[in-house]
Image (spheres, rainbow, N blue to C red):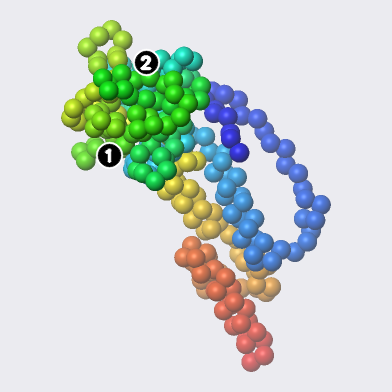
Amino acid sequence: MVKPLAFKGDKKSKKRKTTHPDSSLALEDGDTKTLTIQNVTAEAEEDDSWVTAEAATDVTGPIIFALPSTKPTCIACDANGKIYTSELENIFGGDLATAEPHDVRQVWIASRVAGTNEISFKGHHGRYLSCDKIGALSSTREAISPEESFLCIPSPETPGMFSVQTVRERFLTIVDDCKVPEIRGDAESVSFNTTLRIRMQARFKPRLKANKESKTREKISRKELEEVIGRRLEEDEVRRLKKARVQGDYHEAILDVRVKGKHDKYS
């Protein structure tokens, strides 16, 4: 499901909670696990904060290209596909690592080009970022060709920074010696002006998703564990089950604790 972009300062609508008519029914272990996964997914989908992409594999979903211009700017396009630099308003102390968009024209949808390591960037008007043979950027094409495919190469010197390479092995670069900075795609080598920061929505970052799932697995109370096992638990049993949830052998640990309980009952 496509979720509309939210910008800093927008009011968030509150969702009405409903109770399932069969909520009184007991859940099996598998059902509990399914509900947990669904809760994690829902929580991740609600996370509209912006974070820095750290690896090329992170670059997916809504992104902005934060440029190293004197006054912080990003790559934007108008409804006709003209590319220009747009000043960043949602930024703290000029630090590109805090940049967020305030206008949908600043946002691009990054997608992996099938069968390659290249990435395409679709603008708000449904057309792709493109770089021609002389390094001029535009966004007027509705289909992906080699000119709409880019490589995001991490900077070896500065973590969280990238150089974006075109099909002709040239780099996107900022031209900052005029009143309004310009962006082109004809730099022959990597330099300060070709090194930019890619900001993305947190809910699309693979490592953040994994961390959220891990933290959710850790969150279980003694009462919930005792309801699953069907009896009161010793302190060491609680610790063992919580540890098993993190390590991924939770259901095996449940069986062991249940068997131990039966042995203790008849000994």
Q: Residue at x 22, y 12 (%)?
A: 177
* Residue 87 visible: no
Residue 143 on image: x %, y %: 46, 29
Q: Quadrant of the C terminus?
A: bottom right
> Of residues 155 and 148, which is closer to you in this image?
148
Q: Return the residue at label 2.
A: 84
The residue indicated by pointer 1 is 154
Question: In the displayed image of the protein, which residue is found farthest to the top?
Answer: 179
- Which amino acid lies under the numbered mark 2 shown in the image of this protein? Tyr
Q: Residue at x 52, y 64 (%)?
A: 245
Q: Is residue 72 above or below residue 239?
A: above
Judge by depth and name the residue closer to the eye, 131 or 26.
131
Residue in the foreground of this view, choosing between 236 and 205: 205
Is 165 left or right of 63, judged from the image as shown? left
* Direction from residue 17 to residue 149 in the image, left or right: left
Label whose residue precedes the other's in the sequence (2 or 1): 2
**Crowdedness of circle 2 by 10 Å Cα count: few (<14), some, many (20+)?**
many
Q: Secondary structure at mark 2?
A: strand
When asked about the image quadrant of residue 65, the answer is top left
Quadrant of the rendered image containing residue 188? top left
| Quarter occupied by the N terminus | top right
Residue at the extreme bottom = 267
Q: Residue 2, position in %: x, y?
A: 58, 35
State the CA–CA distance, disc 2 to disc 1. 24 Å
Residue 34, horizontal then vertical, whole percent:
63, 58
